[in-house]
Amino acid sequence: MSQQTSTTGEADLSIDADWSELYIDGEWRAAESGELSDVENPATREVVAEVPKGGEADVDAAYEAAAAAQEEWANTTPDERARVVRTVAQLLEEYEDEICDLLAIESGGTKPRQAIEHGGAVTFVHDAASFAFRMSGRHNQSKIPGKENIVQREPVGTVGVISPWNVPMKLSIRAVAPAIATGNTVVLKPAGETPITGGLLIAKLFDMAGLPDGVLNVVTGPGSTAGDRTAAHPESDVIAFTGSTEVGRLVGQNAVDHFALPALELGGNNPHVVLEDADLDDAVDAGVFGSFWNQGQVCISINRHLVHESIYDEYAERLAERAAELPIGDPLDDDVVIGPIINEAQRDEMLEYVEQTIEEGATLETGGDHDGLFVEPTVLTDVTNDMTAACNEHFGPIAPIVPFSSDEEAIELANTSEYGLAGSVHSADRGRARDVADQIEVGMMHVNDQTVNVEPHVPFGGKKDSGMGRYNGDWILEEFTEVKWTSVQRESRDYPF
């Protein structure tokens, strides 16, 4: 068993620490291949660390350790499971400065994203600690005399977690912490761009908290090898995946091939609907944050601004002015709001969307250019719903503005997408806003706010091609536990033969 480390002790969680080993069965070990992969700072393109290039053999070893540890961990008392998870929350708070620096250096997270990601991770873990005591069952009456029906909630077994690069620590730990609290073991495969904050850092924190060997295992490596094997491994009982819809389909297919439950949180094309009676100050404030937080690299960011034609020009002018003023630069600088895009492939795709949309007839109000991986906040007007930047998930600091003439048209435009993740509606009449919101096909809707909202005790997930299942609160309990019916016959029963 790993030894518990006091939260007042010292640990090296800096980018200069040794990140060259996988975490399997409570041990730090080299990848089977012996190979390492570079980790680059997207702001400077410098190599800042090396991590193991794990493969199928390492994933197999991780699942073997997880399967061996699961029964004993499930039988651990709820207060012990909760204690370990609470200790991780305390460590997150204790090492806030080091962790935020890691988020800046590895993933390009600016101060606003660091604050939200770190604070969100802390609240997620604190909430997850309570899950150990929330696995309640029930007693049901029986139609058979003298019989007692008992319904128990038990851990599913082993949870495979495949996490993304855009908000890596928070989106890893929102699955890892509740899975562990509910008595499951975990194999975590973080994104290749963020193997430290999405994986190895979390392993260190749980190791410091005294988690028993084998309960959490972290394998870094390419998605085509380590990722595919994580999703397809026969020892997994749930695969929790966050990422693109395209990859999510493959992950889901791999999971169901061995009857694992896929919990898939996928892409979005999220509408921000501004009705003609909206408070423009509030709507623009929400639009700026919802489009440009984390450079738009978040599944629930505003992908389309749907604005009533009577206020369209004023809204567009205000949004463009605000976008042009946002400070761009190194995420380690306190005043910076817009940091780098994670890599060249993401940058090139989003800029191609902008170029195609302009060729299709849109007007570039501001932005549209880049310096290295720093893409300017971009506002496009004269956009129709079928133009490239509007009908695709652009995943960047891009704000296409589409006009509409009626509530009915706004609803139709909002729903003309294969995605159904999040949305927002602004109106001075909250009843009217709610009427519109109720008709938009999304899993999460926000009235007089914007789309980037997450709370640990409310369900997170989408409809249509935005995934299946829900994270957070009682809803993640449904994903990571299963029910068992036990009947007890307390007196002799009469049978028909």
Image (cartoon, rainbow, N blue to C red):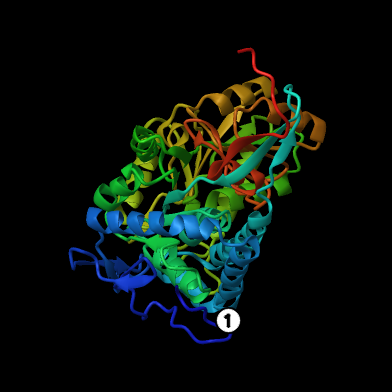
Q: On the rendered structure, is 462 left or right of 254?
A: right
Give the answer, above or below, for where 228 lies relative to 27: above
Q: Label 1 sits on what residue type?
A: Thr
Question: Which quadrant would residue 19 be assigned to in this image?
Answer: bottom left
Q: Residue at coordinates 59% horizontally, 41% vertically from top-left?
A: 478
Q: Picture coordinates of residue 492 (x, y %)?
A: 70, 28
User: Which residue is at the front of the view, 293 or 56?
Assistant: 56
Residue situated furthest top in the rendering: 496
Q: Picture coordinates of residue 273 (x, y %)?
A: 64, 35
Give the answer, above or below, for where 281 lies relative to 385: below
Total labels drawn: 1
Q: Quadrant of the C terminus?
A: top right
Is residue 329 in view? no
Q: Quadrant of the N terminus?
A: bottom left
- The local secondary structure at tag 1 comes to loop
Is residue 125 in view? yes
List the residue tagged with mark 1: 7
User: Which residue is at the front of the view, 467 or 479?
Assistant: 479
Question: Which quadrant would residue 58 be assigned to in this image?
Answer: bottom left
